[in-house]
Amino acid sequence: MAFKWLKRKKDKDAAESPKEPGDKTPDESNRPADASESPLPGSSTDEEGLVPDIEAPPPPLASEMSPAPPLVETLTLDQAAGVEEEDAPADGESVPVEKTGEDQPRRGFFKRLRSGLSKTRDFLNTDIEDLFSGKRKFDEEMLEELEELLITSDIGVRTAMDLIEKISRKASKIDNVDSLKAILREEIFTLIDDAPSEDKGVATQGPRVVMVVGVNGVGKTTTIGKIAAHHVREGRKVMIAAADTFRAAAIEQLAIWAERAGADIVKHKDQADPAAVAYDAVEAALARKADIVLIDTAGRLHTKVNLMEELKKIKRSVGKKMADAPHETLLVLDATTGQNALSQAQLFDEAIDLDALALTKLDGTAKGGIVVSICSTLNVPLRYIGVGEQIDDLQAFNARDFVEALF
């Protein structure tokens, strides 16, 4: 005990007595030779003579820090004005205009129309260019060859003769292929553009009733679905009447198209009276305040008189429920049938008085000239043309677009 007390007293006296320069404490003398001889600035030793952990220096104040360079270089007003002047087009330089959303569907359909008429275009252009092979002069012989070419493309005999007569009057202006194509293009456009385009019947009150007719296989049911989708997109309420009760699965097919288009449908059982279905559809349209009624009919052969009488019965039945209905009778024709489509249109017009035409499957034929023949021969407007199976492949007929796509 005495030894421990004496040791603590010596340690206490040594701590209290001033240390001479150069003196070392016992602990300091026991340090390794490579240890630092002087303590770090700002540090102090503990009771056991060990150097405590050194804290990291505090971060500099914001005011002491130098500003970092900006990530994005800012421009002065004068510099910004200079950039605008450099980006601006020079005088007389055209500025590209961004296409609006409304132009896109039209441009897309014209592209499909041009693609659909590729067979007819290749047929016409190749043969017309062959007329001038050998640097021939445009004469009567070449006119006869051109007439034969037009007839072969299903423009029709009567229409081809009319075109040749008009072209012969301008023969002096034709000296190469391009001049012949330009004159032929304008004459065809004149024939098509002169065709009637207005509606013969317009609903004054209530829904507009359209009866769609045509022979088997022309795409009548599909056309109805596409027309319905067009009206629904424009905000109209559409009612479809499944009056083709004879063909197998016709009602089911039309129901699928009605669902796709977002239209209502009125249907009966198979083999039901078509006139009764049409009557009920008009009645439902009046009750539900529909805007458009599209009546599907059986694919009737135009050579069967009794089937034409059935169409007349449907017209009478609809007229009993709503005066002046149907307001439009639309005939669907298949472009691949060529001149037979023209004879169908003539017979249907004589029987039930047509108001408009729809020409389908233009993408699958080299006889697109049937459009010219129909427009110039019949006093019935061509309302729609179809160039594919998609829902947007049926569009309103435009004479200028058609002629441009044809050449």
Image (cartoon, rainbow, N blue to C red):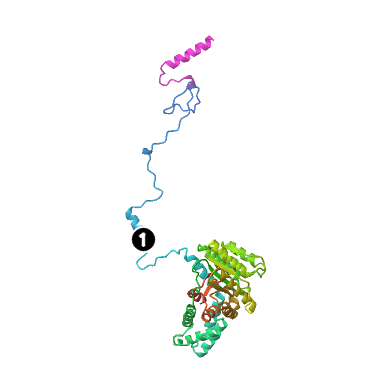
Q: Is residue 189 above or below residue 35?
A: below
Q: Secondary structure at mark 1?
A: helix
Report the residue that reaches farthest toward the left.
78
Q: Residue at 33% of width from left, 57% of height from top?
A: 81
Q: Say whether residue 402 is magenta.
A: no
Asked where in the image residue 17 lies, by quadrant, the reply is top left
Amino acid found under the numbered disc labelled 1:
Glu
Residue 321 position, x and y percent, is: 56, 68
Q: How many marks?
A: 1
Residue identifier under label 1 = 86
- On the image, the x and y values in percent for residue 162 come to 50, 85
Front-lying residue, 267 or 230: 267
* Residue 133 in sight in this render: no
Give the side of residue 162 with respect to residue 252, left or right. left
**Pointer 1: residues within 10 angstroms few (<14), some, or many (20+)?**
few
Image quarter where the N terminus lies is top right
Dominant SS of magenta comes to helix
* Residue range of the region highlighted in magenta in the rendering: 1-27
Q: Residue 6: within the magenta?
A: yes
Residue 57, relative to residue 222: is it above or below? above
Q: Considering depth in this image, is 388 or 320 the residue closer to the camera?
A: 320
Residue 62 visible, this orientation: yes
Residue 378 position, x and y percent, is 53, 80
Q: Residue at x 44, y 85 (%)?
A: 173
What is the residue that sits farthest to the front in this orientation?
Answer: 320
- Residue 305: image location, x then y, percent: 63, 79
Residue 130 lies in quadrant: bottom right
Residue at the extreme bottom of the image, as rendered:
140
